[in-house]
Image (cartoon, rainbow, N blue to C red):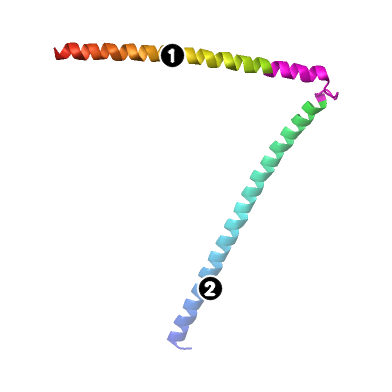
């Protein structure tokens, strides 16, 4: 072999070494990333399991009877009460809006009077 061939072979071997090293680096980074993702997923599943167990306990404690007409009537009464309260609140807000409008007009009149007084 000549010196040029030796240099060529050495360069090719170095290139192959770099490619193999790069391949191993990529492989290990993908492997580690997948393991981290799997660990996170396992933690999420464990959290979901705990939440499901708590939910099953609560559902087991619920009454298993069918709703009666009295239950439906009670729900309607509560909804009506909420609606009445909302209407009262709406009227109170309307009154407050009127009061604030009056205050704004009064402040505007005071400002106008002060500005006119300052000009004279």
Residue lying furthest left in this view? 120
- Is residue 9 magenta-colored? no
For image coordinates 73% across by 19% down, the residue present is: 75
Q: Secondary structure at mark 2?
A: helix
- Locate residue 55 relative to residue 12 in the image: left or right: right
The numbered disc on residue 98 is 1
- Is residue 72 magenta-colored? yes
**Above or below — where is 33 with respect to 43?**
below
For image coordinates 45% across by 16% down, the residue present is: 97
Residue with the mark numbered 2: 16
The numbered disc on residue 4 is none
**Above or below — where is 26 with respect to 113?**
below
Where residue 105 appears, as percent x and y from the top left, is 34, 14
Image quadrant where residue 84 sits: top right
- Locate residue 76 relative to residue 5 in the image: left or right: right
What span is colored magenta in the figure? 61-79
Q: Secondary structure at mark 1?
A: helix
Image quadrant where residue 87 sits: top right
Which residue is at the front of the view, 101 or 51? 101
Q: How many marks?
A: 2
Residue lying furthest right in this view? 65
Which residue is at the front of the view, 3 or 71? 71
The secondary structure making up most of the magenta span is helix
Residue lying furthest bottom in this view? 1
Name the mark nearer the viewer: 2 or 1.
1
């Amino acid at each position: 072999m000549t010196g040029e061939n030796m240099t060529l072979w050495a360069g090719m071997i170095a290139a192959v070494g770099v490619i193999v090293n790069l391949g191993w680096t990529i492989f290990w980074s993908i492997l580690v990333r997948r393991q981290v993702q799997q660990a996170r997923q396992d933690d999420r599943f464990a959290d979901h399991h705990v939440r499901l167990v708590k939910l099953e306990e609560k559902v087991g404690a619920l009454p298993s009877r069918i709703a009666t007409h009295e239950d439906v009537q009670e729900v309607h009464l509560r909804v009506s009460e909420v609606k009445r309260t909302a209407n009262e609140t709406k009227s109170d807000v309307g009154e407050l809006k009127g009061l604030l409008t009056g205050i704004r007009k009064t402040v505007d009149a005071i400002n106008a009077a002060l500005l006119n007084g300052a000009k004279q």
